[in-house]
Image (cartoon, helix red, strand yellow):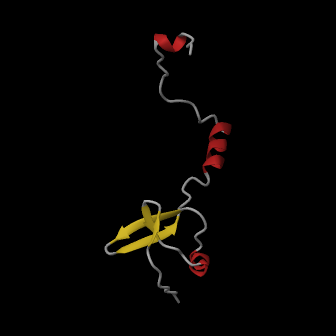
Amino acid sequence: MSTAIRTRIIRIGNSQGIRIPKILLEQSGIHTEVEIEVEGDHLTIRPMSQLRISWDKAFTNMSEQQDDLLLDEVNTMDWDQVEWEW
């Protein structure tokens, strides 16, 4: 069962926003970052997907298998070899 609550658009600095009641946040599982998408005449707000959540483990496995080497040669310029002074 969905919960519909009426609210108003409010001014936040130079932008506008809405206040999302706690009960809706609890039901949706939204805690910090969100994605907002326009679908026709609707805004869809959903929790930010965590696409990189397992990258640390993948990088560790790559390192253990020595599969983390650069594929391209590193081409440096002459000025890369000279110590810079600020």
Task: Give the camera-side residue of 47 and 66.
Answer: 47
| Image spot of residue 30 (x, y percent) | 58, 70
Number of numbered markers: 0
Quadrant including the C terminus: top right
User: Residue at horizontal 52%, vertical 74%?
Assistant: 19
User: Residue at horizontal 46%, vertical 18%?
Assistant: 75
| Image spot of residue 7 (x, y percent) | 47, 81
Left or right: where does residue 61 sit relative to residue 1?
A: right
Left or right: where does residue 16 sit relative to residue 39?
A: right
Indicate the quadrant where residue 39 lies: bottom left
| Image spot of residue 16 (x, y percent) | 43, 66
User: Residue at horizontal 36%, vertical 68%?
Assistant: 38
Q: What is the residue that sits farthest to the bottom in this orientation?
A: 1
Task: Give the camera-side residue of 63 and 41.
Answer: 41
Task: Give the camera-side residue of 81 and 72.
Answer: 81
Q: In the displayed structure, would residue 86 be above or below residue 2?
A: above
Q: What is the residue that sits farthest to the left in this orientation?
A: 40
Q: In the displayed structure, would residue 65 be above or below residue 17?
A: above
User: Residue at horizontal 54%, vertical 75%?
Assistant: 20
